[in-house]
Image (tube, rainbow, N blue to C red):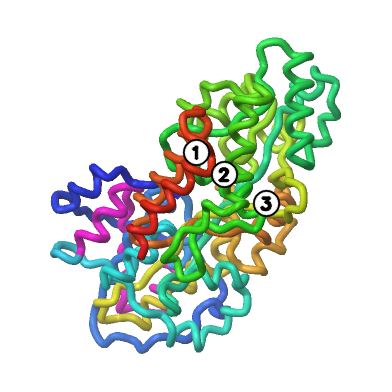
């Protein structure tokens, strides 16, 4: 998940694009709900996707080959683009140009695409889809907008706690034993700073950037807090759980002094890089276990780095946060049955697993999460699966990119010490309520 800048949104009227993709063999036919009616003449189905999904055959090229073999009159056109351009051209397709029959979205765009009338209601397809029972409840629920299905999950990610084992060893800590509680985070960080000169105990992102809020969410969730209410039309992040979790961040910087104030200028990637380089001993939350971004092989990464569930506060329950990507069907597509067949073929566990393994993405099917052998190269796959089981999602409201600005600004103000935690969150909640009511 990444939030588009407001300035980019204002330029939507100027950009649209399309390209094509390739082919290979195929997944099982059981992935599709049913075989669609065969067109009598040539048909091209256009799919707008993220660019990196065409770097390997699975899942889109393999599904394309299988689908086109079944439907010789149908061609799947795979059109890739970077993150911001993907969002822009989907919205711009309403105005003309190449019309996608299906498109890939960040989970936070779901409500926007539904409200814009771009996404087709998928209730009738879900009702007949045999594989629906293979999708965890949390992912099913986050496929909906205002009670109806609009998206089909492709893959996800989770947030986990990481630490540098080399720093733990130097500090006299057990490199295989991470802190299990917030109190232990503080005590471990203090020991690191006492024993390893020049190393900060623990880092977290606090820059004016979406990752500041995103990496804080697990600590809000574990205390029973939520970002918005179930209807996604009122703020709840300024609850007691929200205050407690932001106060934890403030105390790490201002009370215990185990996190440097420079985190106020660091995004999540910068903090992760600092942990990997040994400038921070630990990081409160990163995407996944960080293995894919480390450029190390599995054994080397496991020797150097640890990953675990986020440490818990008193009385809290295990929690994580997740983002990810879904497929949508265009409400204007003339070939909806064909689109549904292709999307379910592409996201079927046998077909998408090689992609998830290579890019360290989290499966969104129970059958995929159970494939420990397929993910054996990832030294912390078991942690990822555990986190997926207790993950919650950022709100997929149309105004989320503005909502999150108020949240991370409140965190920043609190960490800076310019505004008390409760006041910072209350002020942000008042602004967010205006956006989502």
CA–CA distance in space, label 3 to label 2: 17 Å
Residue 369 highlighted magenta (yes or no): no
Q: Which residues are magenta?
A: 64-93
Position of residue 351 relative to residue 220, above or below, is below
Where is residue 7? Give x, y as percent: 23, 42
CA–CA distance in space, label 3 to label 1: 26 Å
The quadrant holding residue 292 is top right
Discs 2, 1 touching: Cβ within 8 Å: yes
Question: From the image, which quarter does the C terminus lie in?
Answer: bottom left
Which numbered disc, 2 or 1, marks the residue that appears first in the sequence?
2
Q: Which residue is mark 1?
A: 411
At horizontal 50% and vertical 33% (from top left) the residue drawn is: 206
Q: Label 1 neighbourhood size at 10 Å, few (<14), some (14-19), many (20+)? A: many
Q: Which residue is mark 3?
A: 384
Where is residue 297? Give x, y as percent: 67, 35
Mark number, residue 12:
none
At horizontal 53% and vertical 31% (from top left) the residue drawn is: 415
């Amino acid at each position: 998940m990444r939030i588009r800048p407001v300035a980019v949104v204002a330029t939507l009227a100027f950009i649209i694009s399309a390209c094509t993709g390739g082919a290979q063999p195929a997944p099982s036919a059981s992935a599709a709900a049913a075989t669609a009616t065969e067109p009598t003449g040539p048909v091209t189905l256009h799919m707008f996707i993220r660019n990196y999904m065409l770097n390997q055959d699975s899942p889109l090229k393999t599904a394309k080959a299988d689908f086109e073999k079944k439907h010789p009159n149908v061609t799947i056109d795979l059109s890739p683009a970077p993150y911001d351009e993907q969002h822009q051209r989907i919205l711009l397709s309403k105005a003309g140009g190449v019309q996608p029959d299906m498109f890939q979205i960040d989970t936070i765009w779901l409500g926007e695409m539904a409200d814009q009338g771009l996404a087709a209601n998928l209730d009738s397809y879900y009702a007949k889809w045999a594989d629906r029972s293979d999708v965890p409840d949390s992912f099913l629920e986050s496929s909906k907008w205002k009670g109806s299905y609009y998206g089909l999950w492709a893959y996800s990610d989770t947030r986990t706690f990481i630490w540098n084992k080399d720093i733990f060893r130097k500090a006299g800590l057990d490199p295989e034993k991470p802190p299990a509680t917030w109190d232990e985070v503080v005590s471990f960080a203090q020991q690191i700073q006492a024993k390893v000169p020049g190393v900060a105990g623990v880092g977290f992102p606090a820059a004016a950037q979406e990752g500041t809020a995103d990496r804080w969410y697990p600590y809000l969730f574990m205390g029973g807090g939520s970002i918005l209410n179930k209807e996604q039309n009122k703020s709840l992040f300024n609850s007691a759980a929200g205050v407690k979790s932001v106060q934890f961040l403030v105390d790490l910087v201002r009370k215990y002094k185990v996190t440097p104030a420079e985190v106020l200028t660091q995004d999540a990637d910068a903090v992760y890089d600092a942990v990997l380089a040994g400038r921070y001993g630990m990081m409160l939350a990163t995407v996944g276990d960080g293995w894919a971004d480390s450029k190390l092989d599995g054994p080397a990464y496991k020797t150097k780095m640890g990953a675990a569930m986020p440490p818990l506060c008193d009385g809290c329950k295990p929690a994580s946060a997740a983002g990810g990507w879904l497929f949508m069907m265009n409400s204007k597509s003339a070939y909806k049955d064909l689109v549904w067949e292709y999307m379910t073929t592409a996201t079927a566990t046998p077909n998408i697993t090689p992609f998830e393994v290579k890019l360290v993405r989290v499966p969104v099917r129970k059958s995929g999460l159970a494939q420990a052998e397929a993910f054996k190269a990832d030294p912390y796959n078991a942690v990822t699966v555990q986190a997926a089981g207790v993950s919650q999602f950022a709100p997929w409201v149309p105004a989320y990119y503005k909502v999150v600005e108020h949240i991370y600004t409140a965190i920043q103000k609190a960490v800076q010490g310019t505004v008390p935690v409760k006041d910072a969150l209350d002020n942000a909640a008042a602004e967010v309520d205006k956006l989502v009511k």
